[in-house]
Each structure stands twice: as structure tokens, then as C-alpha cells.
Amino acid sequence: MDSLITAAARALAAGDVLGVLKRVGLRDDAPALALRGIAMAQLGDFVRAKALLQSAARAFGSREAVARARCVVAEAEIALVSRDLGWPPEALDAARATLKKHGDWVNAAHARHLEGRRLLLIGRLDEAERALATLDPAPFPPASRAAYELVLAGIAMRRVRAKVAHAALDRAKRAARQAGIPALMEEVENALLVLNKPAARLIAHGEERLLRLEEVEAVLESGALVVDACRHVVRGEDTAVSLTRRPVLFALARALGEAWPGDLSRDALVSRAFRAKHADESHRARLRVEMGRLRAALGSLVSVSATIQGFALTPRCAHDVVVLAPPVEDQHAAVIAFLADGEAWSSSALALALGASPRTVQRALDALAIAGKVQSYGRGRARRWMTAPVLGFTTTLLLPGPLPSD
């Protein structure tokens, strides 16, 4: 390895992107192309970065299997950050296996981090946890430990485990400081800010207030019956009933939960569940049918009884009934929630993350754009959507290999 490549690799490890370009910006050999690709990615030029890494992989040739695998892992990270969720995960698995076979444990672990981050992004939390469970972060360098803890914190946030998330972010913060990479430290600080923002609204006894994640966790552990409008689930102390695919039943459960301990009139229930301005006999007949279905679905948690005015909900074991709702409720709140991470998303990536059809997501984006809530750039398949400027990201790959001093 020549001195310029070594110096550029050291600059990359320290987060000095311009230092990398000063040393190898005019070279077209494989290690230089790889380093330039990562540098351009950190500067936000993902298209150029991807092209450089693909050129580097071809230039390394079949005899440089480890170097080619590192290029694939770097390309996978660019795909993740640019929200190209259609990038083939099989290629990342093959690259990780190659790195592990040749003893490059650090970059093999980084490939596993990327797999976990992608699974977390599309909501496959169990698979993300299994991916990280195979890793021991103790021997990792500080930057890799920070990346590992960030994924753990993300999983904990999605599972509403505030204490676990705080602990993981504290460890990530210490590791990022040891690494001394400004972009990595900024990423950890941004995660801490998210953790301290309102995560839900509590609606109970005719009042509502915003809750942070740790307060949401406390509510879920309080023993109260929780009508969770964030996930369309009704939760008891030991039981949770999902009504995700039964929106009418959940609308009724939420309306009764907000009215507890009182009842709610039939006209109000018809309006909430069926969105009818005026209730007629057909609506009331349908309401009776849906109330029967609600009793059957939630029979282990609550009883639903008819009153003179309408219907009332009575918990079987819980001492209280509360409703958890998103901090802001909008027709397209889920789309806004994904765009709020500051990254640029394609409509196809949003559809994959939301589990919705591309056409449904595109209609939502068009409506949000008209309302001035999102903006786009590019055309065709290169079109991306965002709500804020794209933040930088850091990569821990040292593509030319370990430095002479390692």
C-alpha cells in the first residue's frame, strides 16, 4: 500500500473527507476509487459515490475478493442512506460472508449493522434483533460500537423501551467521542433529540397531554386498559388485541375509550365509525352488528354494554382506561413520520416501509406536496421526497484494508 493511500485511509477514519480527496482525487486505481467513493458519499453525492465504488469493485478484480466485498458493503450503506430499499440484500449477505471468511471481522460486523438498520427501517424488528444478536461489540473499534448501539437504540424506541434506548444511546455517545468523527457524534445527538421529543398524546377523562417515550412506557406498564391509536391495538395488563385490519372496530373502541367512564351516544358512534353526518336506521342497525363484533373481539379485556343514550365500555380487570394517540394526527401522518428523519425517500421505498401500494403512497405525497408539507427533487425513478435537508452520514469502512500500524 503506497503512502498516499495510507494517508487517505487515515483521513477517512478521522472523518476528514476533504483530506481524502486532496490525496487521491486525481487517481483512478482501485483503492483510490474506493476511497473517493466513500468520500463523495459523505459529501452527499450518492450517485457519484455509487459509480466510483462500482468502478473500484471492477478494478480490484476477482483476485481481490475482500476489497470487492468491502465495496459492496459501502454501496449497501449508500443505498440505505439514500433510501434505495430495493437494493438486493442478498449481495450484502454474500459480501459479509466473504469478509468473515477472510478474517475481516470489523467490516463483516458493519455489514451486519447495515442489515439490522434496513430491517429496522421497514419495521421487521424481530429479524433486526436476531441479526444483531450474533455480534459481540466488545472487540469493535469505537465507530463500529457506536453504529451497533445506534441500531439497538432504534429497536428499543420502536418497542417503546425508553430505558433501554437511553442506555444504548449513552454508550453510543461515549463510543462516538472516542472515535472522534464529527458526523457520527452528530448522528448520536440527533437520536437523543428524537428520544426526548413527544412520542404520543394521552387522552383520558376528557383531557389530553403530550408524552415522551419514557412516559408512554410508564402508561403501558401502569395496568390501565390502553387503546393504542398509534398501533391500532387494545392492551390489557397481559393481553393485547390487534385491530389493525378492523378499522371500524378500532374506531368504536377508541371513541368509547375517550368517553370512559361515561357512555357515548349512538349518533356520535355512527359519526366516528362510519363518518356519517346523520344517523338513520340502517346506520343504527349496522352499529348494533359492529358492537357485537367488538364484544367478541375484546371479550377478554372489556365488556361493552348498551345504555339509554348509547354504549359504554367497562374494563374487566384494569382500574383505568386511556387512549394513546399520535402526537399529530393527519390523513397522511405515517408518510410524514418516515420523511421526518431528514433523509430523501423514493415513493417505492416509502411503499415498502409502510406496507402500502406505490400508487397509494404517491397520492399521499402529491397531497402533502400541494399542502406544502413535503418537497421533491429529481424526475422519474430518481425522484426523491423529503421534509428537511439531508443530513450527512458516516461510514466506518476502510476499504484498502488495515493500516500498516494496525
Image (cartoon, rainbow, N blue to C red):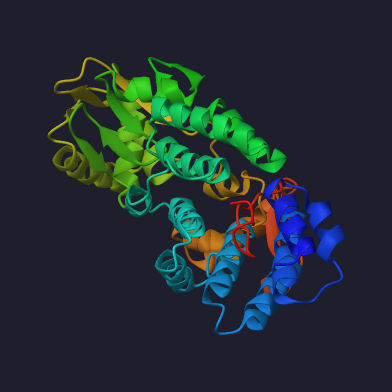
Q: How many marks?
A: 0
Looking at this view, is 25 or 185 the one in front? 25
**Residue at image x 72%, y 64%?**
35
> Is the residue 88 above or below the residue 281 in the image?
below
Q: Residue furthest front?
A: 405
Q: Residue at x 43, y 22 (%)?
A: 214
Instruction: From the viewer's side, name the closer residue of 144 and 83.
Output: 144
Q: Quadrant of the N terminus?
A: bottom right
Task: Answer left or right for 42 relative to 161.
Answer: right
Q: Nearer the viewer, residue 151 or 202?
A: 151
Q: Is residue 75 visible?
A: yes
Instruction: Residue at 53%, 71% (x, y): give it.
Output: 66
Residue 71 is situated, as x and y percent measured from the top left of the image, at: 60, 69
What residue lies at 40% left-to-right and 25% top-to-bottom? 163
From the viewer's perspective, tell me whether residue 276 is left or right of residue 382: left
x, y percentage for residue 219? 35, 21
Q: Nearer the viewer, residue 176 or 278?
A: 176
Choose top left, top right, bottom left or bottom right for residue 379: bottom right
| Residue 199 appears in the figure | no
Residue 365, given in percent of the width and then of the height, sits at 64, 57
Please state the horizontal and vertical placement of residue 291, each as a whole percent of the image: 22, 39
